[in-house]
Amino acid sequence: MLRTVELIKIHPQFLTLRVLAENKIALMDDFMLVDMLYSFLRLNVDPHDSLVQQLVSEAWLRIDRFPMASLSKFSICLSDQHLQHSPLMGHITSIVDQRLSSIDDARILTTLMISMSSLVSPRLRDALISRADHLLDTMDPSNYNNPRRVVQFLRNVKHSYRPLLEKCNKIILCNIPRLDAENISIIMGLYQSLQFNNCDFRLAVKQRLKELIDSSTDPFSFTKLFVALAPMASQEIRDGLENTALLLADELSAHQALAIAEALEEIQSRNLSLLNKIALVIQRNLHCYKPVEVARITQALFLLQYQNPELFTKLRNILVNFLQRSFFPYEVTMLTRVLSMLPCPRLDEGVISRVDAVVTQCNLNDLNTISFAVAKWVRNDPSYRHNTPSKYVRLLQTLNRCGHERLQTADRLDLVLEELKYISGEWFEEMLLEETMVTLKRMMDQINWTNVPELALFLTRINHLCPPLMDRIASMAIKDIDKIHHSATYATLLPFSVLNYDPVQADELYDVCIQRFTPHIRSFDPHLLVLLAYTLAVADCFPEELVKEIFSIDFLGKLDAQLETLPDNLNMRTRLRLMELNRAVCLECPEFQVPWFHERYCQQLQKKGNGTVSPVQQQIHKMLGEVLGGINYVRVAVVTPYFYTADFECILDKHLQPLPYSEPSTLQISDRGKVHWGTSSVENMRDELPPGAQRVAVDFLDSKSFCKNSHHMKGEALMRKRHLEILGYSVVQVPHFEWNSMELSTPDAWKDYLKKNLFRELSS
């Protein structure tokens, strides 16, 4: 912040303002008072300046009579002074709550919404959303800042309210030609925080950003352009952006260098010259960065596999110093997580003490993150080979206790689901999962249409079958399906399909969800529609209108365009699901006359993938050879039509006698455990069998084919069985828990098991 003497030198008008204001505060009207305070803060005056303090005090005395325009501007002043949580902001929030219906200006309302977002209750949040929704319909659609502020409010309160988001997005889309790289970058960041993907927006901003390339030549505008465009640009455009970044690197500020470094990590750049330049800028500005920024820098450079031991040593020391002085739980958590990424022979006791001091204030997600870090430290500690050092044991015990207490004292389902949104890993599954399920069942009466999709996603992600919770989800979805956004039907149906659970009302659940989304099929993002259709296919459900839409030329063209803008992992997942959906429709719904157009894609996957083979599969192969009379009676890793891969295949004649293959089959495994796939399997499948003979596919089902808390088989394993049977196979599935059981602990027992299952399948 600037002092008076400095301000007079930089802003001559400041002296005029100050002279005007001093001794005349009480005489100012409300508009002048707030405008004067606003002007001082825009000039970067120290908030502790005596005149600023006098203006704030006078404003507080008059606040109840302020018109809404002045109240809105005053709220900005408080935010500039980091007083978002102050009693004064609380007073403003109360005034807005009482006078909300009188606010008719979208700019005034949206400004207030952002300023007081940290203090609003769920009731006031919903009222603000409703009022904003109304005012967006009445405002000038060329004012894109109002919908942008609404989206920012939704991000701040962590409430992804889809109808309002889509309305804001529609207004923003109309203004894309007027947006600069900075505004685009801000909006993209907000959408990402809200997990709001919109195909039309991404395609439009991609085109707009490409248009801005030639005019974005200064460090500020170029940095915004690079961060927004590089992750979704073609390789040719990325190369051009990296070349420009190299030329501008010496002019970048500390924070611009950080932004470029994170974007380079996102695109996994291997431009060493640019990385070295950015690292130099970062290194000479290390004193400028805040704790979380140093953590972000360290993470980006580490994930880029950047080789600079000296820089990483400096970063590590800075992280340790920051951590030992920090008392913010979110900050300690992030610093701890990033510190654990770096090699360290022995951890400073001060780090452990600081982490131990804040864990009681951490939420479940933070506790889970810290547990990851502690596990890494334990493994890397030289004394770990002998015993786990007591300092780690005590910290882990504290983490466990805090996690259990937080769950046991929780009383709001929405808050619990927010904390559980990104949790995963061994510590959570071993220490907290059981308690989490108890907590969710305790709060079952709080499950309603607003949290059904979030809870359904959580159960799917943790792979946990819980009939009471899923029955409640089904009944709430059926009851209030019209209130659930059409795009949320995907999340709602996911656990029922993936975990292969049919509630009592299963047919009704699928029917109402299909009726809900069908009228909106063309408004879905293409990738989400593919994921939805695949989820339904796993459950053996193929709505004709949905299938025909996805396999239309127009839709596939739009999907291709969208895939170019998506992150690589989502791009690859969507392409895989489209192939699997194409296969399912061809096999199960030939009447739809959808062509199979993934032959080349599957061949490429096969070449890249060369799947691994486990010791258990090697063991089963050997046993099958002995059961059937020789290794030439069994084929391994057989690729079927439509590119399923059966672990093992054999042919039994009408008398259930094995038939040999013309060529002996050997399980060829490389040193790295890779199977060498054959290309003749698909052709062999088409060979005619002797009358009455049957092909048998033997599949080993590992733990991924079952729910984690039971031996209940998941939907994809059942769909695979259905499809292999359509292809003419008798399918024998060998669950891992049966093969590895105490009952099957000898070669004879394994062979008897295979005989019984092989011949029982065929005789039935």
Image (spheres, rainbow, N blue to C red):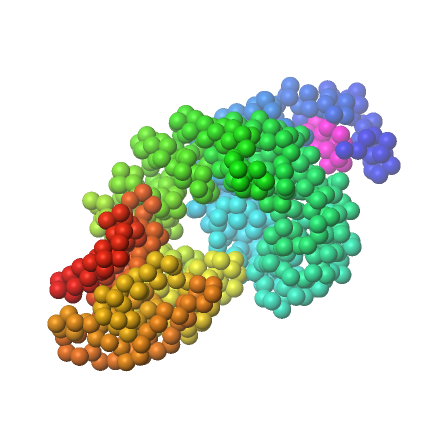
Q: Nearer the viewer, residue 299 or 86?
A: 299
Magenta stretch: dominant SS?
helix
Q: Position of residue 488 (x, y in %)?
A: 37, 48
Residue 232 lies left or right of residue 37; in this view the side is: left
Q: Taking 167 as reference, is 734 above or below it? A: below
Q: Is residue 68 visible?
A: no
As drawn, is 7 to the left or to the right of 557?
right
**Residue drawn at 43 percent across, 46 percent down:** 163
Coordinates of residue 763 in the picture (x, y in percent): 13, 64
Q: Residue at x 75, y 35 (%)?
A: 44
Q: Which residues are magenta?
A: 33-47
Marker count (numbered): 0
| Image coords of residue 729 (percent x, y) | 23, 68
Q: Residue at the location (52% across, 58% down)? A: 567
Q: Please check the rendered image and state whether residue 131 is part of the magenta-colored stretch, yes or no.
A: no
Out of 263 and 67, give the one closest to the viewer. Answer: 263
Q: Is residue 301 left or right of residue 362?
A: right
**Residue 329 seen from this side:** yes
Give 79 or 72, whichever is nearer the viewer. 79
Residue 36 is one of the magenta-drawn residues: yes
Left or right: residue 623 versus residue 268 is left
Q: In terms of image quadrants, where is residue 406? A: top left
- Figure check: 521 above or below 471: below
Q: Where the N terminus falls, by quadrant?
A: top right
Position of residue 597 measured from the top left corner of the image (x, y, whole percent):
37, 73
Residue that appears at 47% across and 34% down: 364
Q: Quadrant of residue 478?
A: top left
Quadrant showing the C terminus: bottom left
